[in-house]
Amino acid sequence: MAEARPRMFHLRQEDGRHEVDIVAEIRGGAVIGIEVKAASVPAARDARHLAWLRDQLGDTFLAGVVLHTGPATYALGEKLIAAPICTLWS
């Protein structure tokens, strides 16, 4: 049996206080948040909206990823990583 495709959304509160580029809901309602940044070395501040989403969702939040233009993958916080955008096709 084929797995269901993830449902993808953009999250933006009315006042713009929190915004996540892509929220992917996968099997069982689990969520992965994705931010896309032009920076080559994003900092923890670049994952602040993902951290907020993680704190709001608790165990439902699997991971948050900040995709960037640099070459390195590294941790930005609990369940949060920075990864090169090229990891999508490599």
Image (spheres, rainbow, N blue to C red):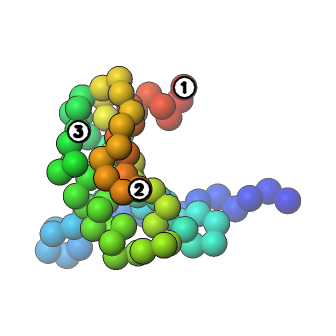
Numbered disc 3: secondary structure: loop
Q: Residue at x 27, y 67 (%)?
A: 52
Locate the N terminus and report the quarter of the image it occupies.
bottom right
Give the label, 3 or 1, closer to the camera: 3
Residue 20, image x, y percentages? 31, 59
- 73 in relation to 63, above or below: above
Q: Earlier in the sequence, mark 3 or mark 1?
A: 3
- CA gap between label 3 and label 1 equals 20 Å
Q: CA distance from mark 2 to mark 3?
A: 16 Å
Secondary element type, mark 2: loop
| Front residue of 22 and 63 | 63
- Residue drawn at 22 percent across, 48 percent down: 44
Mark 1 Cα-neighbour bin, 10 Å: few <14, some 14–19, many ≥20: few
Q: Look at the numbered disc 1 and give the secondary structure of its residue.
A: loop
Q: Which residue is mark 3?
A: 42
Query: Which dot marks residue 79?
Result: 2
Q: Which residue is mark 1?
A: 90
Q: Earlier in the sequence, mark 2 or mark 3?
A: 3
Tell me the residue at 30%/28% (across/down). 69
Left or right for 30, reference 19: right
Earlier in the chain: of badge 2 and badge 1, it is: 2
For the point 31% across and 53% down, the residue is 77
